[in-house]
Image: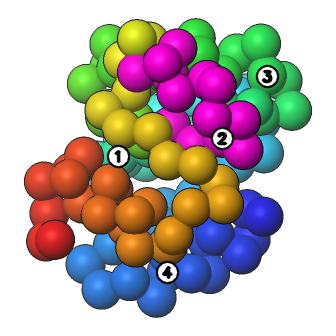
Amino acid sequence: MRRALDAALSEVEDLEVLGVCGSAAELCRCATAHRPDIVLLDVHLPDAAAGLGLIGALTRARVPVVAMSAVGGVRGASLAAGAVAFVEKDGAADTLVDALFAAGQGPP
């Protein structure tokens, strides 16, 4: 899923993918190294206990987070933790792209 998402988002004009991470630790390293404008976060990373906590940490570091999950029931918890938007994994690609641009206040 990560690689497919990376490939799809890399095709979007005015959007640059800085990294694809498979764990909370990897995301922390990548975010520190690259200082992204936005993070798209799968709330259920392999080390899922960190998912919602990462939203808070990134938000405190002033990095907007768009949360994503196959489980719609975590929408409220993700937004309460500080995510600026929530998208479902099986949602439309346009919905994801719109959420990313809205989070970064880039082109619609």
Residue at point 63% right, 35% down?
72
6 lies above or below 54: below
* Label 2 – label 3 distance at C-alpha: 11 Å
Image location (x, y in percent) of residue 19: 57, 58
Contact (Cβ within 8 Å) of mark 3 with mark 1? no
* Label 1 – label 2 distance at C-alpha: 17 Å
- Type of the residue with mark 3: Ala
Q: Judge depth for marks 1 and 2 and give the one in front.
A: 2
Q: Kindly indicate the quadrant of the structure image that contains residue 30.
A: top right
72 lies above or below 48: below
Q: Residues within 10 Å of mark 3 (few under 14, many from 20)?
A: some
First of labels 3, 4 by sequence position = 4
First of labels 4, 1 by sequence position = 4
The stretch of residues the image draws in magenta is 67-79
Mostly what secondary structure, the magenta segment?
helix
In the figure, is residue 104 to the left or right of 13? Answer: left
* Label 4 – label 2 distance at C-alpha: 20 Å
Residue 24 magenta: no
Q: Secondary structure at mark 1?
A: loop
The disc at residue 69 is 2
Q: Which residue is mark 3?
A: 48
- Type of the residue with mark 1: Ile
Image location (x, y in percent) of residue 83: 39, 27
